[in-house]
Image: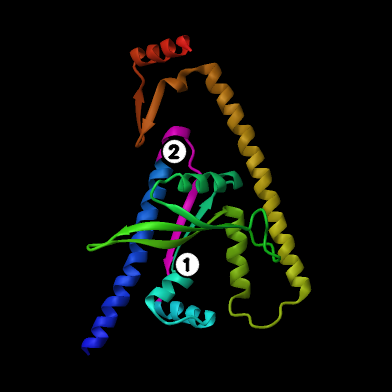
Amino acid sequence: MEQFKRFKDEITRFLMMYKFALDSLETKIEILKEEFHFLHDYNPIEHTKSRLKSPESILNKINRKGCDISFPSIRSNIKDIAGLRITCSFVSDIYRIRDMLGNQSDLTILETKDYIQNPKPNGYQSLHLILGVPVYMSDRQERVCVEVQIRTIAMDFWASLEHKIFYKYNETVPPRLLQELKEAADSAAALDKQMERLHHEIAEIKESHMENGGTGTKRIIIRDEEFQIPAALLELIDIGQGNE
């Protein structure tokens, strides 16, 4: 009984590290969302979803890989125990978020798989990153791997339905259906390109209106509260620009 309790404590502590890594990463994402919203009046991140593999799922994967059943072996061979999916509005946002994460001094991009530039044969598109995330435990610091998948709404829609269609489907999929699935992925990619083009055009029109009107540049909004920029600060900006 004592041995079982010791093992239970070990596996709980092991999984807690991955949970803490996810919590830390989600906090960073929330800060990036708010910062981008305040500075650009636009949020590139539509939503996030995290998950932690169950002990049973971890054991099944380690068996499929033919690796030793030990905590060091699991850490070395399974990089997706903790997973975070980030859904964006546009393809350019995907790479912007990747760069934002890469610029965090305590995060390390350990691995990148770009299924947008190189889609899978079935049409699947997404950017996969393995991040090294520091976790501070009571007696030590650990660096934990978290898999991050970044995709657009259209990519996520396609991937979710593809999973539902073929979940637990053990038969060989007819070539005709595979071709239709690939065509649906191509349509989703075309939609992404069209919506991004429209987004850029609207942004240019909005920027032009602001430059002509000028009133929008004299206020800032933080936490839904509007603040006027004092005239003295605006004068400092004018002076600074005059000295350039």
Q: Secondary structure at mark 1?
A: loop
**Location of mark 2 (residue):** 37
Residue furthest right in the image: 176
Location of residue 176 with respect to 31 vertically, above or below: below
Along the polypeptide, which appears first: circle 1 or circle 2? Answer: 2
Residue 225 shown left or right of residue 139 in the figure: right
Quadrant for residue 195, please give it: top right
Q: Position of residue 122 (x, y in %)?
A: 69, 66
- Nearer to us in this view, 214 or 104: 104
Q: Position of residue 188 (x, y in %)?
A: 67, 55
Confirm or deny contact between disc 1 and disc 2 (CB under 8 A): no
Magenta highlight range: 35-54
Residue 89 visible: no
- Amino acid at pointer 1: Lys
- Nearer to us in this view, 78 or 25: 78
Q: Secondary structure at mark 2?
A: helix
Location of residue 209 with respect to 185 vertically, above or below: above
The CA span between labels 1 and 2 is: 31 Å
Magenta stretch: includes residue 36: yes
**Location of mark 1 (residue):** 79
